[in-house]
Amino acid sequence: MTTSEADAPQFDVDVDFLTGQPYPLWAQARGECPVFQTHSTMGFTDRPTFVVTRFADVERVLRDTEHISSSINAEHIGQYMGELILAMDGQEHRSYRGLVAHAFRASQLEKWDDALVRPTIERLLDGIAPLGKADLAQAITSKYPVQVICGIVGVPLEDAAQFHQWSELINGGPMHPEEGMAASRAMRDYLAPIVEDRRVNPTGDLISDLVHAEIDGQKLTDEKIYGFLRLLLPAGAETTFRVMGNALVALLTHPDVMQRVIADRSLMPAVIEETLRWETSVTQVSRCATEDLEVGGCPIPKGAAVSVITGSANRDTERFDHADEFDIDRPTANHMAFGTGQHQCLGMHLARLELRVGLDSILSRLPNLRLDPDQPPPEIMGLAFRGPESIPVLFDPS
């Protein structure tokens, strides 16, 4: 099959990257043109870019290793993170993922519950519980996940705020290249002495595991070590920070649901999974076509970029009834918040652990939690990354 750009339906995307609300546009695309070519800069690439919006098509693309590659990630975010597992395919990806996957298994992560995750959220709540009011985005969600991931990796907790700043700049590198590159260099310069120390004095943290890991008798190169760390620290900090904020907004704007969860904590997993479906923090992933193919009736030429909109798939009404609503009682069905296929998110078990422990502690430590009526209501916003900038709340001091 041969294809040309002229064969592809056009459907321009015009949503502000930081503050936009893309769901109405994605819903229109799913109904009118579920796979379309765009000339927007959302792909951050000079290749022709095709956007996939329906659940079935998203699932197909993410599971297709024969015609679809992840190598395109080296072209945009890879410039700022270095050699990435996200950009690997085939045996290279399987070998490298196998080295680090054990650290993120659910059974392995449970050891961090009492040792790191719970103490971190409790310490942060200690700082606001007596006050009776706070901005949960600034006081809790922006600090909690980055402190947890720093603890797992082996980075001093007192530098977590710096890593949060670097993480935001690296993730925003495609839009602001100079700031992204500067943050990438700064993170590597900071990590270099820690990496070198772990070569001689391993401590059991993730950096120690990485510097001593081997594939076919060969240790990882420095570029792969720093590439993984520059991926893991921003991913572990930024994505969970946003989705935890989304969960809090969902509960605070559905006080009846929040009261049910306070009374019955067995509902917490349903809250977490519904939040991940309803407002996942990362709405799209990048792939490229390794040969001519057709997705959802749309021809995609070899070499084209494919922007896979997992956030749109999670609102597909062919998959989920009343998909725009937050409903913890909906029947269980797999969502795409963590993707699927060989590149399914390594950190999904850690994210669920942090959300479960963090939300449980917040509801326990901040009685009579409610939105502050004197402050603007929180708003979840953004195109590729979604979350609230502010969550002003009141509660009974304790």
Image (cartoon, rainbow, N blue to C red):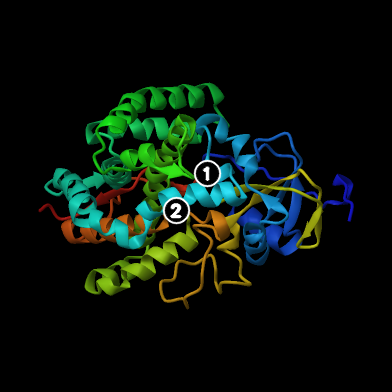
Q: Which residue position holds label 2? A: 346
Give the crowd class for mark 1: few <14, some 14-19, many >=20 residues within 10 Å.
many
Q: Is 84 above or below relative to 182?
A: below
Count of labels shown?
2
Q: Amino acid at mark 1?
A: Ile
Identify the residue at horizontal 38%, vertical 22% (top origin).
189
Give the crowd class for mark 2: few <14, some 14-19, many >=20 residues within 10 Å.
some
**SS at mark 2 in the image:** loop
Residue 164: quarter of image: top left
Q: Is 131 above or below relative to 396?
A: above
Of callouts 1 and 2, the N-terminal one: 1
Q: Is residue 131 left or right of residue 334?
A: left
Q: Which residue position holds label 1? A: 85
Identify the residue at horizontal 43%, vertical 66% (top origin).
274
Q: Locate the N terminus by quadrant.
A: bottom right
Contact (Cβ within 8 Å) of mark 1 with mark 2: yes
Please state the horizontal and vertical placement of residue 297, each as a whole percent of the image.
80, 62
Please state the horizontal and vertical placement of residue 132, each as a whole percent of the image.
16, 49
Q: Is 277 above or below relative to 46?
A: below
Identify the residue at horizontal 24%, vertical 53% (top origin).
112
Q: Is residue 113 left or right of residue 171?
A: left
The answer to whether residue 369 is seen in the rendering is: no
**SS at mark 1 in the image:** helix
Q: Amino acid at mark 2?
A: Leu
